[in-house]
Image (cartoon, grey):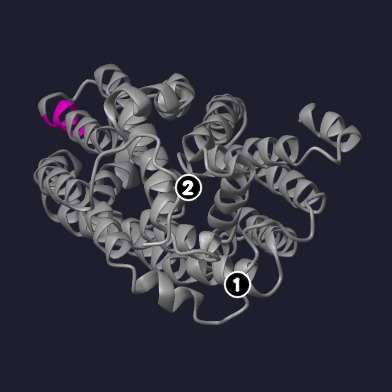
Amino acid sequence: MTLLPAIVRSRRTPKRIAIGLYVSAFAAVGAAAPYLPVYYQSLGLSLDAIGLLVAVAALCALIAAPAWGLLADQVAGSRLVLVAAAGAATVCAVGLGLASAPALVAVIAVLYALSFAGIAPVLDAYALDQVADNQHRYARFRVWGSASFVVATVAVGLLIQQTELRSMFIGLIAALLVSAALAAMLPARTSAHVQRSLGGLRVVLRTRTLVVFVGAALVAWSASTMVNGFLSIYLVSLNAPASLVGGAWALGALVEVPVMIAFPALAARFGLNRLIVLGATLLLARVLVLVVTADPYIATLAMTLHGAGYALLLVGGVTYVARYAPSGSAATAQGVLAGVVTGLAQAIGPGLAGLIAGVTGIHTMFLFAAVASVFGIAAVALAVFRAGTDRASAPATAA
C-alpha cells in the first residue's frame, strides 16, 4: 500500500488515483476470489450448494452493476458511488469473516456481491474518461489491477498456509478500506457525467450492436466461469497446497500484465475484433488442458492460457463497449457489460457447473465447459465481425 502516500501528495493527478484504485480493488479480488469457494466448502457446503450460492450472488451483481453505473452517470457521480460501494463491501467482508453459520454466510455473501458490483463499472468508466478517444490505452490502467491481483493472491495464499483460511479476510478488508479512501479523492464530476435523464439504461439497451455483443460475451464468459468457480476446489482435491492454489490464480493474472501492456500495439496490428475472438479461443484451450490431465501442476500451468485469454477478452470487451456506447452513458454501458461478466455469467456458469459436478464430478464438468466454450467463440466472432469494419483505432461513436 505504499502507493497511497504518493497519491495523497498528488491529489490533482486523476490518473494516479485511478491506478491506485485498480491496485486496491483488484487486491481485494485477489484476496477473496480464489479462496471463497474453499471457505464455503470448509463451512460444510456441498458442491451444488456452493454453485447455487455463487449463482445467486452473481445474479444480484447482475442487477447491481448497471444500477451503480446508472447512479454514477445520472445522480451521484463516480466519487460518491465508489466510496459507497467500497464502504458497504468492507462492512460485508467483516461479516463474512466473523460468521460461521452457513445460512448467515450465504446472506452476507449476497450483500457483498451487491456492494462490490458497484466498483468495476464505475472505475472502468472513469479510467476510459481519462484516456478520452484513445480507448485502447484503457489497458494501461487495467494492467495495474492484474499486477495487484498477482501479489495479493500469492500473499494471501502464503498467509493462509501459515495460519488459517479465515485470515484471507485480513487482506480483503484492508484492500477495501484503501479503495474507499482513494475513491474519496476523485473529482466530484467527470466528463462522462453528462446525461441527466433516467433513460440512460434504456438508450444502452436499444443499441443493437452493444446488445448483440453483450449476449455473445455472456456465452463465452459463462463457459469460463464454469471452470473458475470450482478450480480452487479441484486443485485442493488433487492435494495441491494453498500456496499452489494461490499460485495458479496468480500465474494467470501475471500473464495478463504483459498482454494488457501490449494491447494497444496488438490492436493496432491485428484489429480489436480479432483480439476479442482470440481471447475466447484461449479460454477454450485452458479448459481442454484440464479435461485431458489431472496433474495439479499441469492444471496450474494451464492458467497461463486463461490469463492471456482473460486479458484479451476483457480489455477488448471494455474497449468495444466504449466504442459503441451512446453519448452520456459510458458508466451505464460498462455497468451492463460488468453485469454480464461478473453477474449473469457468474450465475449461469458456476450454477450449472455445480449441478453437473454434483452428479458427475468436477473433472467431467470441465468437458461440458469445453463444449460451451466452443459455442462462446462462435457467438463472439459473429457479434464482432457483423458490427462493422475491424478498425483498431476507431474513435468512440454513438451507435
Mark 1 lies on residue: 195
Relative depth, front residue between 135 and 212:
135
- Where in the figure is residue 188, as x and y percent of width and height? 79, 60
Spatial CA distance of label 1 from label 2 is 38 Å
> Mark 2 Cα within 10 Å, few/some/many (few <14, many 20+)?
many
- Where in the figure is residue 378, as x and y percent of width and height? 11, 46
Q: Quadrant of the N terminus?
A: top right
* Residue 113 appears in the figure: no
Relative depth, front residue between 201 and 120:
201
Residue 70 in the magenta stretch? The answer is: no
Q: Is residue 304 left or right of residue 355?
A: right
Q: Is residue 391 left or right of residue 388?
A: right
Say what secondary structure mark 2 lies in: helix
Residue at 49% over, 68% down: 66
> Mark 1 Cα within 10 Å, few/some/many (few <14, many 20+)?
some
Relative to 292, is 327 above or below? below
Q: How many marks?
A: 2
Mark 2 lies on residue: 36
Q: Quadrant of the C terminus?
A: bottom left
Single out the residue that lies furthest toward the bottom.
198
Residue at 37% over, 37% down: 232
Query: Residue 167 occupies which quadrant of the picture?
Result: top right
Relative depth, front residue between 273 and 19:
273
Q: What's the amino acid at mark 2?
A: Leu
Residue at 48% over, 61% down: 335
Q: Which residues are magenta?
A: 287-291
Relative depth, front residue between 263 and 174:
263
Relative to 81, is 394 above or below? above
Q: What's the amino acid at mark 1?
A: Gln
